[in-house]
Image (cartoon, grey):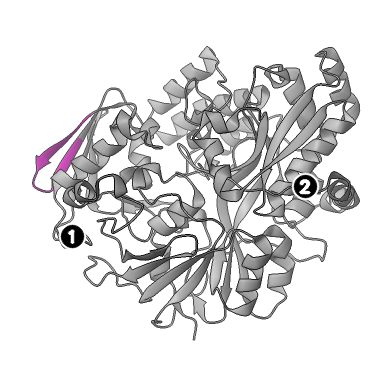
C-alpha cells in the first residue's frame, strides 16, 4: 500500500477456526521465544540471502505465481503487490531502486539539486516507448502531472503534495520546483510515483489505460495478452534502451488459493513466485524441486486500526490488545518462523543510515515481550470496555493473515473483548485500502506494509492528519509538526534524529498495532535463477534478470 505509499501495503488473509489456531499458537509460543535465527517447527534456519545465483543464459519463457489479479496496471494507482510486481518490468521511473535497496539513475541519467526546493532531471537520449515513440521531457511532465491531478485519485498523490510545478526546461530536461524543502520527494522518484509513460499512448487509451491494450512505457518487457481472471503475459521489448531481458516472455498466473499456488510451484506449472504461503515454507524447501530464498523485505506485519469512533478510540484499548498479543507464537506459526516479533512500527533495516545512538533511541521501549494478560485486562476494565465488540477483517490468501486475525480474536477474548472475524474475498480485500465504504463496520484488519524507500519516514508519514493510509483519522498536531520537520531536512543523520522521536511517539500512540518484521520470500525451481531476494522487485525490473539456471 506499502502492499505501499505512501500507499503500499499487502492485503492478505484467511478465516480459520479460533480453537485450532489458538491451540497452534499456544503450543509453539515457547519454541518461538528461543534465541537465535528464526526457525519453523522443523528447525529450519531462515537466513537472509543477498541475491540468487546469476542466470547462465537465456530462456524462451517462465511462469510466475501471483496471488491476485491486478485490478489495473495504471501506474498512478500501483499501490499493492500484484500491480507493482508486474508493472515494475513494464514501466520505468526517473530513478531506480536496486536489489541492494539503494537508488541509481533510471530514465533520468542525472538528478541534480541546485537549491533546497529544486530538482533537475536530465533524461537519457533515444529511449523508446513500447508504442514506438521516443521519450521527451513533455512525456515526463505529463506523467508526473497525472499523479498530481486530483481527478485521478492517484495513490501516490501524497508524494507530490509539496510540488509547486513540473516544467520542461529543455528537450531532455525537467525541473521540479517544490513549495518547501522535501527530502522524501526525490527518493520516491525511484518508485511507481516516478514512472514515465508516453503522453500520446496514455491519451489514446483514455479510460481503458491500465486495463487493456498497451501501457506505453519503456521497460524491458511490454504488456502482452491479458486473459482476465487467468493470467497476464509480458513480451520482451527488443527496442529496450538498457540490458536485454534474458527471457522472451513472462506469464503471471493468478492463483488466489494458497494450496493451489504451492502445488503449482511443486509441479512446475509455475517456475517461481514471491509472497510464498507461509505454511508452505518447509514443504517447498524440502521438496527438491527448487530453492526457497529469503531477503530483506523492509516489511512489517501490523493490525491496521480503521475506526477510532468506537472502543479503539481509547488508547488504553489499543494498548491492551498490543499487550495481549502472542507475537512470538504468531511468528512461529503464522509466518512459518521466518520473522521477528516486534512492538515497533518500522523495520530496523530502514534505519541503516542512522548512527547507533539514534537507532537505539528510535527503538527505546519497543522491545517485544511476552503477553501480559493481567495488565491488559486492567486497561480494558479501566477504559470501561469489558464486553465491547470489535470486528476484524480477513481474507483467503494465506495463513499469515488468517492466523493473525485469530490471534487477535484469542487475545481479545482473554482480556474481555468480543472480537468477531469478517471474511472478505481476496480481490475485494484491496478495496479496504481505497474505499472508506468497504471499511464500514470493520475496526481492524491485518496489514503487511512494505517501505518503498529506505527511510523510516515512508511508514511514519502515514499517521499524519489526512494521510492516505490514516484509515481511522488519527490526528496529533505535535506528530504532524515532527513529520514536517523531518521532511524538510535533506541531511540523513539530522533527519533520522527527528524521525527517532517521531517513531517513539507513533509506537506510544498505536495508530496501527505492530506485530512482526517479515522478510521477502522467493521460490525458484531448478530451471530458472536470477530473481532478486529483496523487496526491490516492487520497482526494479527483476524479471529481466531471470534466465536459465544451467
Q: Is residue 370 left or right of residue 435?
A: right
Mark 2 Cα-neighbour bin, 10 Å: few <14, some 14–19, many ≥20: many
Q: Is residue 202 left or right of residue 397?
A: left
Q: Secondary structure at mark 2?
A: helix
Question: In this picture, is 544 found above or below 385?
Answer: below
* Residue farthest along the left direction in this orientation: 171
Measured from the top left, where is residue 233 in percent x and y? 40, 68
Q: Quadrant for residue 362, please give it.
A: top right
In this view, 322 is above or below 215 = above
Other-residue count near label 1 (Cα within 10 Å), few / some / many at <14 / 14–19 / ≥20: some
Looking at the magenta stretch, what is its main secondary structure?
strand
Q: Give the residue number, with chain letter if any, for mark 2.
A: 330
Residue hosting label 1: 127
Image position of 35 with respect to 430: above or below:
below
Q: Position of residue 400 (x, y in %)?
A: 70, 51
In the rendered image, is residue 547 in sight?
A: yes
Query: Residue 130 or 496: which is nearer the viewer?
Result: 130
Where on the picture, by quarter, is residue 141?
Answer: top left
State yes or no: residue 173 in magenta: yes
In percent of the image, x 75 and y 56: which residue is there? 337
In the image, the segment drawn in magenta is: 165-175
Task: State how far apart marks 2 and 1 are (Cα).
Answer: 48 Å
Q: Secondary structure at mark 1?
A: loop
Residue at 68 percent of width and 81 percent of height? 288
Answer with mark 2 or mark 1, whichever residue precedes in sequence.
1
Residue 143 on the magenta span:
no
Please state the horizontal and vertical placement of residue 524, each as a whole percent of the image.
56, 73
Tally of numbered discs: 2
Amino acid at each position: 500500500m506499502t502492499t505501499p505509499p505512501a500507499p503500499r501495503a499487502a492485503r492478505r488473509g484467511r478465516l480459520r477456526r479460533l480453537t485450532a489456531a489458538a491451540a497452534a499458537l499456544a503450543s509453539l509460543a515457547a519454541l518461538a521465544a528461543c534465541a537465535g535465527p528464526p526457525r519453523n517447527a522443523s528447525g529450519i534456519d531462515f537466513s537472509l540471502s543477498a541475491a540468487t545465483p546469476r542466470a547462465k543464459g537465456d530462456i524462451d519463457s517462465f511462469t510466475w505465481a501471483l496471488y491476485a489479479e491486478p485490478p489495473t496496471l495504471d501506474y498512478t494507482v500501483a499501490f499493492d503487490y500484484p500491480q507493482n510486481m508486474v508493472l515494475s518490468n513494464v514501466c520505468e521511473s526517473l530513478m531506480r531502486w536496486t536489489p541492494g535497496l539503494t537508488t541509481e539513475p533510471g530514465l533520468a541519467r542525472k538528478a541534480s539539486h541546485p537549491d533546497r526546493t529544486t530538482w533537475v532531471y536530465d533524461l537519457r537520449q533515444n529511449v523508446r516507448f513500447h508504442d514506438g515513440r521516443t521519450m521527451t521531457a513533455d512525456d515526463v511532465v505529463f506523467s508526473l502531472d497525472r499523479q498530481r491531478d486530483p481527478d485521478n485519485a492517484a495513490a501516490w498523490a501524497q508524494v507530490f503534495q509539496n510540488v509547486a510545478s513540473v516544467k520542461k526546461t529543455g528537450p531532455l530536461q525537467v525541473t521540479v520546483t517544490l513549495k518547501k524543502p522535501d527530502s522524501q520527494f526525490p527518493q520516491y522518484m525511484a518508485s511507481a510515483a516516478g514512472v514515465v509513460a508516453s503522453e500520446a499512448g496514455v491519451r489514446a487509451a483514455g479510460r481503458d489505460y491500465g486495463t487493456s491494450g498497451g501501457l506505453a512505457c519503456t521497460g524491458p518487457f511490454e504488456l502482452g495478452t491479458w486473459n482476465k481472471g487467468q493470467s497476464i503475459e509480458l513480451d520482451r521489448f527488443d527496442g529496450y534502451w538498457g540490458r536485454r531481458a534474458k527471457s522472451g516472455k513472462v506469464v503471471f498466473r493468478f492463483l488466489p488459493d494458497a494450496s493451489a499456488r504451492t502445488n503449482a510451484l511443486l509441479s512446475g506449472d509455475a517456475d517461481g513466485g514471491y509472497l510464498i504461503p507461509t505454511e508452505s515454507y518447509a514443504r517447498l524447501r524440502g521438496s527438491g524441486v527448487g530453492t526457497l530464498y529469503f531477503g530483506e523485505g523492509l516489511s512489517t506485519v501490523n493490525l491496521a486500526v480503521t475506526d477510532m469512533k468506537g472502543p479503539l478510540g481509547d488508547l488504553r484499548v489499543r494498548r491492551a490488545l498490543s499487550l495481549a498479543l502472542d507475537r512470538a507464537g504468531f511468528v512461529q506459526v503464522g509466518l512459518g518462523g521466518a520473522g521477528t516479533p516486534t512492538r515497533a512500527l518500522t523495520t530496523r533495516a530502514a534505519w541503516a543510515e542512522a548512527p547507533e545512538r539514534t537507532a537505539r533511541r528510535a527503538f527505546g521501549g519497543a522491545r517485544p515481550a511476552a503477553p501480559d494478560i493481567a495488565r491488559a485486562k486492567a486497561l480494558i476494565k479501566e477504559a470501561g470496555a469489558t464486553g465491547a465488540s470489535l470486528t476484524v477483517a480477513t481474507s483467503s490468501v494465506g495463513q499469515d493473515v488468517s492466523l493473525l486475525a485469530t490471534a487477535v480474536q484469542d487475545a481479545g477474548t482473554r482480556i474481555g473483548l468480543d472480537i468477531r472475524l469478517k471474511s472478505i474475498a481476496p480481490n475485494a480485500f484491496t478495496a479496504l485500502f481505497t474505499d472508506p465504504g468497504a471499511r464500514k463496520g470493520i475496526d481492524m484488519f491485518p496489514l503487511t506494509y512494505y517501505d518503498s524507500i529506505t527511510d523510516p519516514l515512508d511508514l511514519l508519514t502515514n499517521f499524519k492528519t489526512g494521510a492516505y493510509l490514516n484509515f481511522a483519522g488519527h490526528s496529533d498536531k505535535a506528530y504532524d509538526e515532527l513529520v514536517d520537520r523531518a521532511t524538510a531536512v535533506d541531511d540523513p543523520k539530522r533527519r533520522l534524529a527527528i524521525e527517532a522521536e517521531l517513531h517513539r511517539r507513533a509506537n506510544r500512540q498505536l495508530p496501527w498495532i505492530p506485530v512482526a518484521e517479515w522478510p521477502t520470500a522467493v521460490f525458484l525451481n531448478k530451471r530458472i535463477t536470477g530473481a532478486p531476494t529483496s523487496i526491490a522487485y516492487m520497482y526494479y525490473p527483476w524479471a529481466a534478470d531471470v534466465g536459465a539456471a544451467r
